[in-house]
Image (spheres, rainbow, N blue to C red):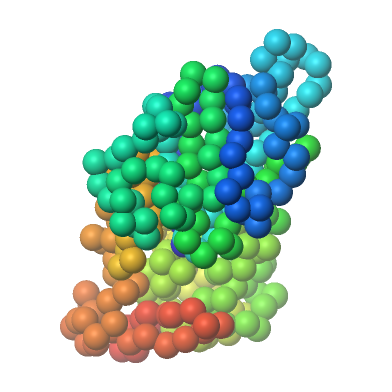
Amino acid sequence: MPELPEVETIRRCLKRKIVSKVIEDIEVLSKKNFIGDKREIFGLKITSISRYGKVLVFGLNDPLNLSSGLKRYLNFHFKLSGQLLYADNVKNATYINKIPFTKSNKMPANTTRVIIKFTDKSGLFFNDLRKFGWVRISAKPLFPKGADVLSKEFTFEYFKKITHESRRPIKLVLLDQDKIAGVGNIYANDALFVSAIHPLRPANSLNEKEQIALYQAILQEIKKGVKHKGSSGGDEAFVLPDGSKGNHQRYFLVYQREGQPCLKCQGNIKRIKQNNRSTFFCPLCQK
């Protein structure tokens, strides 16, 4: 699942490519993945690309009358297997690498759900193997409730408050987008390892020293993920808009390292299930 670093990587890549382009048409291949009347945004110009948590948002406006007040937003949530690919020529889109889940380097493919076409003949392909992701038109950005990890709202005092108020396992609190926007399974696992905190610990059992260590570890691991252009993990589901892979999987600390030696103590990394999701940790280092 694309998390904050992956979505931020997509945002940075697309900002250079599509800001100021005008939407000519949208081809919806799966109605489940597209919400809204596509005709509302025909002829609108992309004026901004922003991200909050795991949600990517295009700001749209009337290119002929920017003061008209006609504003719409095109929101993307990638969920488990979403991808967003850019092509200079939407009718002849070919990539250097085969795109994961498609067995092809050409678009559209068997997992393509939505095609966004611009007036200059370029375009975007929204792929989603499992059909959990969505593209949605709205009058306001559809941002999650929690504080984005890279925003000024994500202070230590904020983090201390949400951990102190919850008895849930700390790993599950980190994944709650209504509390902390952007952290997913990859970066939660590795941040808990860096801070030497067991994922099953009740959140309110952390003392202030542990809270500080975890807060700093979250920021550290998220920023590392952005620096490495995201993680293309075991399934290599995540790709950049040009079809290339992220690099952060080379730097995983415990995530997807079950049975491998701990980087600190050389003991074996263990895996358990929490809410049907895999949690990786070192039982010797994390208490």
Does residue 108 appear in this view? yes
Quarter of the image that includes the C terminus = bottom left
State the residue at coordinates (67%, 78%).
166
Which quadrant would residue 255 be assigned to in this image?
A: bottom left
Reply above or below: 12 against 225: above
Q: Where residue 262 sits in the image (x, y, percent)? A: 23, 79
Q: Is residue 236 left or right of residue 124?
A: left
Q: In the displayed orientation, state which residue is furthest to the top.
A: 64
Which quadrant would residue 9 be assigned to in this image?
A: top left
Which is nearer the eye, 255 or 81? 81
Q: Is residue 41 left or right of residue 171?
A: right
Does residue 157 appear in this view? no
Q: Is residue 208 left or right of residue 272?
A: right
Reply above or below: 100 against 141: below
Reply above or below: 129 against 90: below
Q: Where residue 259 sits in the image (x, y, percent)? A: 24, 85
Q: Where residue 88 sits in the image (x, y, percent)? A: 39, 27
